[in-house]
Image (cartoon, helix red, strand yellow):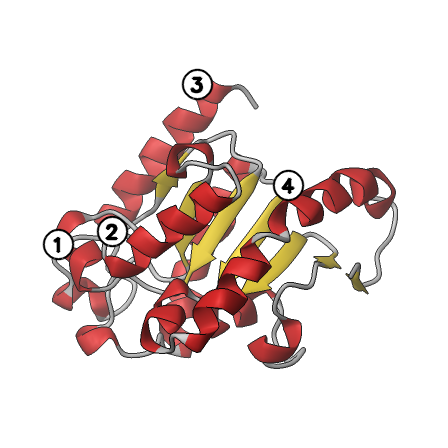
Amino acid sequence: MELEEKQELLAKLREEISMCQKCPLAKSRDRSVPGGGDPNAEIMFVGEAPGFNEDREGVPFCGNAGKLLDELLGSIGLKRSEVFIANTLKCRPPENRDPLPEEKKACRPYLDKQIEIIAPKIIITLGKHSMETFLPGVGGISKLRAKLFRRPGLRYIFPLYHPAAALHNGSLRDTLTQDFNKIPEALKKVEAEAKPALNKQQDLTLF
């Protein structure tokens, strides 16, 4: 898919999300937060849900967690403009509570469409709820973090802690930094494994 076509499709999707009334969050939101970044990104980050700042600005990860995410991206030689960042929910839950199953279900088609358009080589989930969207019932994030998974039709999944967790628990910051440093290695593994993966239908943990 050409860049111009991707841009047009993402713009239409943003408009659709802005008018969405599929769940009660539409009534409490200030602005929807569809996500943004490079339509041709090899890496797509998927967080959990917009927070206070995101709801005001309409931009994902624009608060303190976003500043840390930018630092972590910089530590591996990336800029926000070179990746695509989205969330499992496109609207802020009241008081920043956890996303509800029915809210995630309502928003899932938007996320799936973004993935289809962008076609990233690897999806990096940030936080428990994002991870469970792609790897339900597999295990906790402390067990699965920084491991690369492949599932039929879901491309490659690389779960990490959410940056906000490192802000609340300083001991996780070093862990998150170390895990981010594994992203280039994971991407190389994806590039090496992608072609044979298309012919296999089993779930697989690569490392």
Q: Residue 152 carries which label?
A: none
Tell me which amino acid carries mark 2. Answer: Cys
Front residue of this view, candidates 51 and 21: 51
- Image x and y of residue 72, in percent: 44, 51
When asked about the image quadrant of residue 135, the answer is bottom right
Q: Distance between the Cα atoms at labels 1 and 3?
A: 28 Å
Circle 2: is it few (<14), some (14-19), or many (20+) Cα within 10 Å? many
Q: Spatial distance from mark 1 to mark 4, Cα to Cα?
A: 31 Å
* Side (left or right) of 18 relative to 137: left
Helix, strand or loop at mark 1? helix
Of labels 1 and 3, earlier in sequence is 3
Disc number for residue 4: 3
Q: Which amino acid does label 4 sit on?
A: Lys
Q: Classify mark 2: helix, strand or loop.
A: loop
**Which mark sits nearer the N-terminus, 3 or 4?**
3
The label nearer to you, 1 versus 2, is 2
Label 1 vs label 3, nearer the camera:
1
Residue 82 image position (x, y, % from top left): 45, 33
Amino acid at the residue labelled 3: Glu
| Residue 154 visible to the viewer | no
First in sequence, mark 2 or 3: give its number: 3
Q: Mark 2 points at which residue?
A: 62
**Quadrant of image for the N terminus:** top right
Q: Which is more N-terminal, label 2 or label 4?
A: 2
Residue at x 58% of width, y 63% of height = 159
